[in-house]
Amino acid sequence: MLNERNNLYRMWRPYYNLYYFCMQKENNFRMTYQRKPEWLLTKIYSDKSYSHVNTVIKEHGLHTICTSGKCPNQSECWSRGTATLMILGNICTRACKFCNTNTGRPLPPDLNEPQRVAESIQLMKLKHAVITSVDRDDLKDGGAAIWAETIRKVKELNPGITLEVLIPDFDGRTELIDQVIDAGPDVVSHNLETVRRLTPQIRTKAKYDVSLKVLQHIASRGKTAKTGIMLGLGETEEEILELMDDALAHNCSVITIGQYLQPSRKHAPVSAYIHPDKFAEYKQIGKEKGFRFIESGPFVRSSYFAEKHVG
């Protein structure tokens, strides 16, 4: 009888281990993911404008932060004929805990990319465009030369267009930031992403004070300096207000505030879903503190209605 029990145990043990493993995964999933509240339900758009933008992006082999970042506004923005184009490939050298962009060893820069981006914007008939990029710590100039060439090509092929660029920190090297600024964008944005305390946990290589200095340098060159942050990562209200004060002290005049949404289980979990009323409160506080423009809401992202921030 004992031998029979042992044989049964050996036979069923792999299945038991598999069941136990799956239950652990399920428990981890429940602990990591919170059910989204009703105010985070998105409307799906799929009209002719959406299809046109989608076709242009695919035919020109372009990348967008809309797709790689799993932006909840993608269908709405594409239906309005806008998209945030991402240059320098779709593989980032950093592994920030909030970002869904692929991490690894990027391919060499595509020298034809600036022309393709400019032609795509022309085909989309955009009056305002937003361009961002992955971090390219593998390149000596961080990709600044490609950045500058892309801006020049866009301006050349699309006279009269207004252009916002959402740039990496370039390790705080002002000579590289100047290459981008000298090419002539209208708004230069660099995101703080989160409060000082959480920055080392969430942004890997980036540093809070370096980002502030980047914003200050942008403003010192006569450009509109803009930043964006996410809520729901465990920050306190006091820390959010401190960040606003820090940004203003470094001459940043535009800020966007949105809800962090966890892209996958390997990313930082959502600590809290912030109610729309609280976002409205932060918007009012930001106005009173002195921001020229402030967008604050669960679905707000860096480039959401970015055309309003020019001037």
Image (cartoon, rainbow, N blue to C red):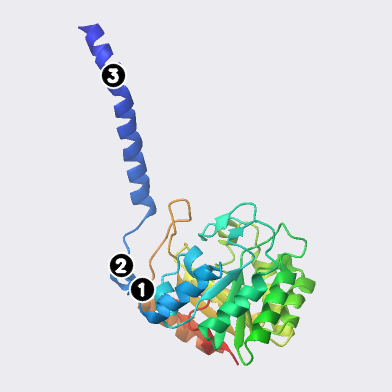
Quarter the N terminus occupies = top left
Q: Earlier in the sequence, mark 2 or mark 1?
A: 2
> Which dot, 3 or 1, sits closer to the camera?
3
Quadrant of the rendered structure where residue 197 is?
bottom right
Q: Nearer the viewer, residue 145 or 51?
A: 51
User: Which disc, if any, is residue 256?
Assistant: none
Residue 173 is situated, as x and y percent measured from the top left of the image, at: 76, 69
Quadrant of the rendered structure where residue 190 is?
bottom right
Q: Are marks 2 and 1 in contact (CB under 8 Å)?
A: yes
Q: CA distance from mark 3 to mark 2?
A: 45 Å
Q: Residues within 10 Å of mark 1 (few under 14, many from 20)?
A: some
Q: Earlier in the sequence, mark 3 or mark 2?
A: 3
Name the residue rendered at 41%, 77% in the picture.
50
Determine which residue is flagged by label 2.
Answer: 37
Q: Nearer the viewer, residue 289 or 33?
A: 33
Q: Nearer the viewer, residue 264 or 225?
A: 264
Quarter the C terminus occupies = bottom right
- The secondary element bearing badge 1 is classed as loop
Determine which residue is flagged by label 3.
Answer: 11
Name the residue rendered at 43%, 83% in the picture.
80
- In this view of the protein, can residue 291 be seen by the observer? no
Q: Nearer the viewer, residue 162 or 256?
A: 162
- Residue type, label 2: Pro
- In this view of the protein, can residue 208 be seen by the observer? yes
- The secondary element bearing badge 2 is classed as loop
- The secondary element bearing badge 3 is classed as helix
Q: Residues within 10 Å of mark 2 (few under 14, many from 20)?
A: few
Q: CA distance from mark 3 to mark 1?
A: 52 Å
Determine which residue is flagged by label 1.
Answer: 275
Taking 271 as reference, is 36 left or right? left
Name the residue rendered at 61%, 64% in the picture.
134
